[in-house]
Image: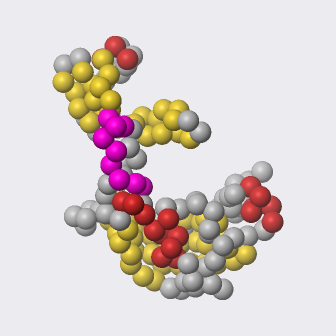
Amino acid sequence: MQIAKHKVVSIDYTLTDDSNKIIDTSKGSEPLTYIHGIGNLIPGLEKALAGKSEGDAFEVTISPQEGYGVHDESLLEVLPRSKFTAEQEVQVGMQFYAEGGSEMQVITVVGVEGDRITIDGNHPLAGRMLSFAIKVVDVRDATPEEVVHGHVHGPDGHHH
Ligand code: ZN
């Protein structure tokens, strides 16, 4: 079965950055299972997967535009230390979640100078070239219920 809209697809993947450092991998855990064609994955990855079948293995490099977006300088913000709780240790590289409109947003601390804390609201992978090594493990039709919910139901997905 070929990957197309509303197929439930399971993939093994390893994501590396442009210096060949592994950022994320499914090795050692369950494959990633998602519904194709509804924006569950970054656009470049869904494009590369379309038309592939179970057992296919390939590599793809994805630009920021087709990945997590370009780095947007306007999402950098300088906050006073007092915006953080007293017991919070604030260090460069620290990440936390904040409400960003409809979805949770990852905020990364990118600078600490005295009482001035610089935070970056870009996705941690924004502006990065991403290389994926992919193996398609399974392809099946989504159930009508899964299509309506927009996510995969058990055994590896939601149970409800
Ligand atoms: Zn559901």
Most distant residue in the right direction = 144
Judging depth in this view, the residue of 41 and 55 nearest the camera is 41
What is the quadrant of residue 107 in the picture? top left
Image point (25%, 65%), residue name? 18
Image point (22%, 27%), residue name? 112
- Please give the range of residues in magenta: 68-76
Q: Position of residue 98 (x, y in %)?
A: 48, 32
Q: Is residue 89 above or below residue 45?
A: above
What is the quadrant of residue 32 in the picture? bottom right
Q: Is residue 81 visible?
A: yes
Q: Position of residue 153 (x, y in %)?
A: 72, 60
Q: Is residue 19 above or below residue 87?
A: below
Judging depth in this view, the residue of 154 and 148 nearest the camera is 148
Q: Looking at the rendering, in which quadrant would you find the N terminus? A: bottom right
Q: Position of residue 129 (x, y in %)?
A: 31, 63
Most distant residue in the front direction = 74
Q: Position of residue 74 (x, y in %)?
A: 34, 37
